[in-house]
Image (cartoon, grey):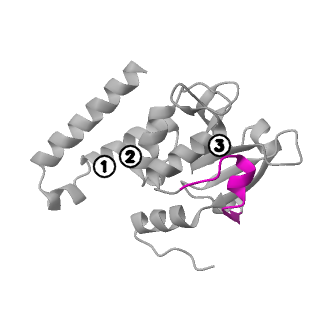
Amino acid sequence: MKKKTLVAMLFACVFTVSQAQTPATESATNPSDPDNLAKDYFSQIMGVAASATSNTKLYQFIYEWIGTPYRLGGKTKKGVDCSKFAYELYDKVFNTTLGHNSRNIYTQVDPIKKDQLRPGDLVFFKIRSRNITHVGVYIGDDKFAHASSSRGVMISDLNEAYWKRYYYNGGRMLTAATQSEEENGSEPPIN
């Protein structure tokens, strides 16, 4: 964890220094601007295309939590379960409050098909149950971040046989969808 903190601090320092030295107009077109560097960095470590990493805050949050051990009912970096991880992410990244378990969270979303998932959407699973038992946050390129009961906070692929078998549905919170659309410069879909 100390290594991650050091990397995050280094990233923040580079970002601050480069912002101070780069005029605002040059930053938008310069491929080495800090936002592009952050997108490239998170793209590489999370296995997601750089074009999918438009919400740097989302990827930084996930990066800071990767490796956090699983703990049922936990909601800190000492231990967290899947719904509390999604809860904390939505609270810090989207300023949105989610329910306290995966079934409750599912009642708060608009269901969406797998091929319509965008970074920040939620993915739900029914693992050996008729009810929803697991939730993760989609990050692009069929990858999602979640708190696994066996390996803690990690990134998995929806195309892995295990996740494919238990995948139930995707869901989009209205607040997250609107924020994501604003960051991408497009209008949110009208339902």
Residue 40 lies, in percent from the top left, at: 38, 43
The kind of residue tagged 2 is: Lys
Q: Which residues are magenta?
A: 97-112
Residue 13 lies, in percent from the top left, at: 21, 35
Q: Are marks 2 and 3 in contact (CB under 8 Å)?
A: no
Quarter of the image where the N terminus is located = top left
Residue 116 lies, in percent from the top left, at: 64, 63
| Figure check: 97 above or below 150 | below
Residue 185 lies, in percent from the top left, at: 40, 70
Q: Are marks 2 and 1 in contact (CB under 8 Å)?
A: yes
The kind of residue tagged 3 is: Ser
Left or right of residue 62, residue 124 in this image: right
What's the residue at 38%, 46% (across, down)?
39
According to the picture, the residue beneath numbered tag 3 turns out to be: 83
According to the picture, the residue beneath numbered tag 2 turns out to be: 39
Q: Nearer the viewer, mark 1 or mark 3?
A: 3
What's the residue at 69%, 64% (across, down)?
112
Task: Indicate the secondary structure of the residue bearing disc 2.
Answer: helix
Nearer-the-camera pick, 91 or 35: 91
For the question of whether residue 141 can be seen, the reply is: no
- The disc at residue 35 is 1
Nearer-the-camera pick, 33 or 91: 91
